[in-house]
Image (tube, rainbow, N blue to C red):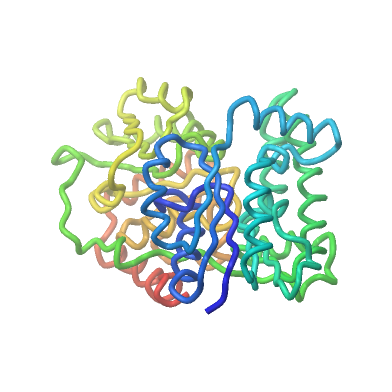
């Protein structure tokens, strides 16, 4: 049994959003075989209540708050030095001191940084016989590049700066560590555009779904009114790509759906809705739930899930979870990049508003249960956590 150091930019519990699903399942797997020393940040006050439960998976756990003016000052200071805002945002002296003490007092054999921003805390490669791994998941530098192209000045200028600075940081981390893991072949291709010679270091570790938990056979109560047609989107609603996606859907796609189906309802299900998302609830037929205790009933009893993400990278857990619940999905092409061009038959790809609306209407009006089953079969066979 080895001692492993695991570094996460967000506390990996509860597994209720994309990055936390991946980091929690990695932690759960590692802790069943090794002693895990976990260091993580908390950016949501709701998550402090979960620290004790998370400690059950750890030999030792250290958490620190992130956000507010201190993190903002650290980010600005990094920018003034030509460095990444994101990496600077997570600078924390207490975190560094705890990590240094663990490396000095414990026989750590592997150190894993979850996300490029946490690679700043990886020990020196010269620290004994220590293997260093960085799980980038997605290439965040490319995410910021996309943001810069969709935003107005001055945000576009800041986002473009961060894209370039973070790309330099990602390449520096790649040179430093023994291995980098990414969520899809497309992310790996982008990573190696700058340095193809590093190909042996870069590996694909795909996301998966707990198909026992996301099982439509489980008994649940419907959150919807009887006789209604329901379209659902799930995700953290303070995340820029999700906010932009649902705003585009409501503005550009939803009117075409309501024109044919006046009683149709669009449900935006997810924590921390931004002001822009909350305002969408004033539009006829649109509901914004905020945080819910269980997302599964919203998936089980809906007619179709949508993933209108035009600023997407990697594998979208929201798509996999919907498919696991036998729910057909209509998605923008960007939301399916992580499936490497191999979506199941229950996923319709649509880019333009009219095309997107038509695809949603087809599912509302005639989606068959037999066809829906293909989605769960695909996930169980290829993307269940049991087989990953």
Q: How many marks?
A: 0
- Residue at 53% of width from left, 50% of height from top? 62
Task: Give the vertical position of 165 relative to 285 (above or below).
Answer: below
Residue 228: which quarter of the image?
A: top left
Residue 47 in view: yes
In the picture, measured across the screen, residue 154 lies left or right of residue 33, that is right
Residue 227 horizontal/vertical position (percent): 15, 41
Nearer the observer, 42 or 267 = 42
Residue 253 horizontal/vertical position (percent): 45, 35
In the picture, measured across the screen, residue 360 lies left or right of residue 351, that is left
Residue 74 horizontal/vertical position (percent): 72, 32
- Residue at 35% of width from left, 33% of height from top? 290
- Residue at 73% of width from left, 37% of height from top? 85
Residue 259 in view: no
- Most extreme residue toward the front, as rendered? 105
Residue 380: which quarter of the image?
A: bottom left
- Residue at 24% of width from left, 49% of height from top? 297
């Amino acid at each position: 049994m080895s001692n492993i150091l695991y570094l996460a930019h967000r506390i990996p519990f509860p597994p209720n959003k994309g990055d936390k699903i991946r980091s929690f399942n990695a932690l759960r797997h590692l802790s069943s075989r090794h002693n895990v020393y976990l260091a993580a940040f908390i950016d949501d006050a709701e998550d402090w209540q979960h620290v004790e439960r998370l400690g059950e998976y750890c030999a030792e756990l250290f958490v620190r708050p992130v956000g507010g003016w201190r993190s903002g000052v650290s980010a600005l200071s990094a920018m003034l030095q030509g460095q990444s805002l994101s990496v600077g945002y997570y600078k924390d002296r207490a975190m560094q001191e705890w990590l240094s003490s663990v490396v000095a007092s414990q026989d750590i054999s592997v150190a894993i940084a979850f996300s490029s921003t946490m690679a700043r805390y990886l020990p020196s490669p010269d620290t004994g016989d220590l293997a260093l791994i960085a799980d980038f998941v997605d290439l965040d530098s490319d995410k910021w590049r996309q943001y810069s192209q969709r935003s107005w000045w001055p945000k576009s200028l800041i986002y473009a700066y961060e894209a370039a600075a973070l790309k330099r940081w990602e390449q520096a981390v790649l040179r430093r560590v023994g291995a980098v893991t990414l969520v899809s072949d497309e992310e790996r291709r982008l990573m190696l555009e700058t340095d193809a010679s590093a190909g042996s270091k870069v590996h694909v570790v795909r996301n998966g779904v707990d198909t026992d938990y996301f099982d439509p056979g489980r008994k649940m109560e419907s959150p919807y009114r009887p006789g209604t047609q329901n379209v659902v989107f799930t995700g953290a609603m303070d995340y820029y790509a999700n906010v932009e996606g649902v705003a585009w859907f409501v503005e550009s796609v939803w009117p075409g759906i309501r024109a044919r189906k006046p009683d149709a309802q669009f449900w935006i299900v997810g924590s921390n809705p931004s002001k822009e998302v909350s305002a969408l609830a004033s539009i006829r037929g649109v509901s914004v739930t905020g945080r819910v205790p269980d997302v599964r009933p919203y998936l089980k009893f809906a007619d179709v899930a949508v993933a209108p993400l035009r600023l997407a990278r990697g594998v979208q857990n929201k798509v996999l979870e919907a498919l696991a619940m036998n729910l057909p999905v209509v998605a923008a092409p960007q939301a399916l990049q992580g499936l490497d061009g191999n979506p199941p038959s229950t996923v319709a790809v649509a880019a333009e508003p009219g095309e997107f609306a038509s695809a949603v209407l087809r599912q509302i009006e005639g989606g068959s249960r037999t066809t829906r089953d293909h989605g769960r079969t695909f996930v169980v066979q290829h993307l269940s956590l049991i087989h990953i």
